[in-house]
Amino acid sequence: MFGIFIFTIIELMLFSLFYKITLVGESLFVIINSFYVVFYVIKKYPKYSYLIIFGYILRMLILFIDYNHIFSVLHSGADTEIFHRNASFNALRGSYDLVRTNYHLFLTWLYMLLGDCRFIAQYINVIFGLGVLIYIFKIIDEYDMNERVKKQTLTIAVIFPHLIIFSGILLREAWCEFFVSASLFYFVRWMKRGGVYSASISIICVLFAAWMHSGCVFVAVGYLIAIAFYHPKKMISKVSVSAIVISVVLILISIVVLTSTDIFTGKLNTFDEEKFQENGMYSEIRGGSAYLTWINPNSAWQLILFSPLKIFYFLFSPIPIDWRGSQDIIAFFLDSVFYIYIIYNVFKYYKKIQFGMSKNMLRYLMISLFILSFIFAYGTVNSGTAIRHRCKIFPIILTMYAVSVSEKRKKMYINN
């Protein structure tokens, strides 16, 4: 994956030599990059290259459909147009007046470099989407799962509808998904081999994901607890004085980072809603798929009391009792069904795993998943936003599924 990024960055630098890139230039950029991507995948991952390339083609197809407005793509509309128009506005004036999120900032930098290059901007998301597939493959390969589980897990990642959609449209989800996947790979590598390098890179990748969406920083909670208590060489978790000290230090550092800087957790100070509205670039949009609007906790006890229901809705909405029409039904079968199936199997087989790296890995990933679900659940009030947020952490859920099913198959093989 590193080779694809290096090639893409070099290509961006070369194309930036032109004053303003045209659609023909953008198309040439994508064609050249596509040839390299296919060559790289075939050479680097020959056994499963057909699946990865198929996933790449699906994401390119969504990009083509969305960019040319052949038909309306789910989740592409108000937010994507605001991102594009605000970045164009900023780049045209050489300012950062209409920067609301770091994705606005990223697009503004890109548009300042190349001109109005939406096609390339969306293609970069395709590259991130491809990276998710590659890192999921690297995770299951690093864990040394049986071939059937590897193929099944990678196939789910390739065809999961919202991983495809968010990789082809102009939203920040693909960025978050990629760095969460990368962080997960290095965490799995650390669980298996140990080493400061893998632990450090896993946390750095979390911070890159959090730069685009602050909620992703809580992915690191399970990682940090594992780093403090887990011993990779012995494959056991052990409470010790040093582990407790490390945990306290990590918690204090996290509190300092979260409270003293807005780099990862705050909105950019340059956001001015009135200026957005003056230029017709911003509107307050509320989705029609709101749920649990009656829950408004005003104490810690109420927060705890309602959290199971909020988390349930975050993970599985739109659920049948709240369907409002065909869109909710489609969303349920294209998204919620996957989570119901995967999470059910994780908990089904988790309790049957007695010890070892698998048990510990699932335990720490469950901590991250619970914290993330809790945070996102209270920051989400409609199913559309829930779908977007939980897709950011889909690689974690899918990895937990792969580990659980892999252990099940190992037992079946041993018993036979």
Image: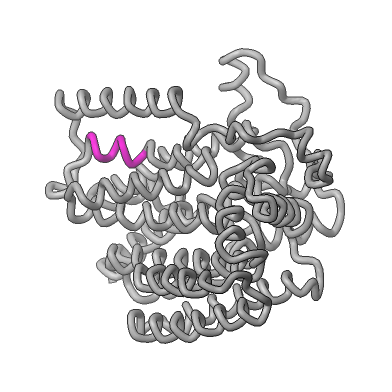
Q: Nearer the viewer, residue 348 or 111?
A: 111
In the figure, residue 4 lies in which quadrant?
A: bottom left
Q: Number of callouts in the render? A: 0
Q: Nearer the viewer, residue 222 or 346?
A: 222
Question: Relative to 89, does residue 5 appear above or below in the rendering?
Answer: below
Is residue 178 rendered to the left or right of residue 361?
right
Does any portion of residue 35 appear in the rendered image? yes
Q: Which contiguous range is marked in magenta?
A: 222-228
Q: Residue furthest right?
A: 325
Image quarter hosting the N terminus:
bottom left
Q: For residue 225: magenta?
A: yes
Is residue 200 rendered to the left or right of residue 45?
left
Q: Nearer the viewer, residue 325 or 321?
A: 325
Is residue 179 rendered to the left or right of residue 355?
right
Residue drawn at (38%, 69%) of the image: 6
Q: For residue 128: magenta?
A: no
